[in-house]
């Protein structure tokens, strides 16, 4: 597992005092309120203030005191140490841990998870093997076992999910 994971991307500056606007990669946006630092380009930056505004995170980083300095951070991804992340419930996983997992139905290799789509009701795993793509709903009756350590997921696909199964 990665020791760090990305939690957002700086998409713009806000105001003239060096505040940056972060697009959060997490469902737990309130996590930003509890952070004391962010990692950007492998460097630790201390946070002096954070607030949530219209599902975006506005953050003041110590040492960044004007708009011009803040503009250098636009398009930078922000990271944290894994242990500073939100504690997950059982059968919940960080996206970063699921991406790259090999997906199998019984012994048949279906591909690797390349992205995860959040639909509101349930997540959908995008599984690719070459040019083949399968969209697998992340439901307990479909996803039977997740082994993050070995990067392996066992599924039981609903009938008709794969095109060639449709008659």
Image (cartoon, rainbow, N blue to C red):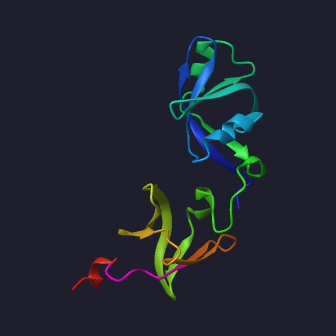
Q: Where is residue 112 in the image (x, y as percent from the top left)?
A: 50, 69
* Residue drawn at x 70%, y 71% as measured from the top left: 149
Q: In which quarter of the image is the N terminus?
A: bottom right
Q: Which residue lies furthest to the front in this view?
A: 121
Q: Where is residue 4 in the image (x, y as percent from the top left)?
A: 71, 50
* Residue drawn at x 66%, y 49% as measured from the top left: 5
Q: Judge whether residue 131 can be spotted in this image.
A: yes
The answer to whether 117 appears left or right of 14 in the picture is left
* Residue drawn at x 44%, y 68% as measured from the top left: 137
Q: In this view, does 26 lie above or below 158?
A: above
Q: Is residue 159 magenta?
A: yes
Q: Quadrant of residue 119?
A: bottom left
Q: Where is residue 108 in the image (x, y as percent from the top left)?
A: 47, 86
Q: Position of residue 146 (x, y in %)?
A: 61, 74
Q: Does the magenta stretch include residue 90?
A: no
What are the residue bounds of the magenta stretch?
A: 154-160
Q: Is residue 87 above or below residue 10?
A: below
Count of numbered tags: 0
In front: 16, or 118?
118
The answer to whether 35 appears left or right of 124 in the picture is right
The answer to whether 34 appears left or right of 77 in the picture is right
* Residue drawn at x 49%, y 68% as measured from the top left: 138
């Amino acid at each position: 597992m990665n020791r760090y994971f990305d939690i957002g991307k700086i998409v713009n500056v806000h105001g003239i005092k060096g505040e940056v606007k972060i697009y959060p990669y997490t469902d737990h946006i309130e996590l930003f309120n509890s952070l004391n630092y962010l990692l950007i380009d492998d460097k630790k930056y201390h946070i002096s203030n954070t607030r949530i505004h219209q599902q975006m995170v506005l953050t003041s980083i110590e040492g960044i005191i004007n708009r011009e300095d803040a503009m250098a951070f636009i398009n930078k991804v922000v990271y944290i140490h894994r242990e500073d992340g939100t504690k997950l419930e059982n059968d919940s996983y960080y996206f970063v841990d699921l991406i790259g997992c090999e997906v199998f139905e019984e012994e048949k290799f279906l591909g690797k998870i390349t992205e995860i789509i959040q639909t509101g009701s349930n997540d959908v795993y995008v599984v690719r093997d070459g040019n083949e793509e399968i969209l697998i709903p992340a439901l307990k009756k479909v996803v039977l076992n997740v082994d993050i350590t070995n990067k392996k997921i066992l599924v039981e696909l609903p009938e008709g999910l794969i095109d060639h199964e449709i008659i």
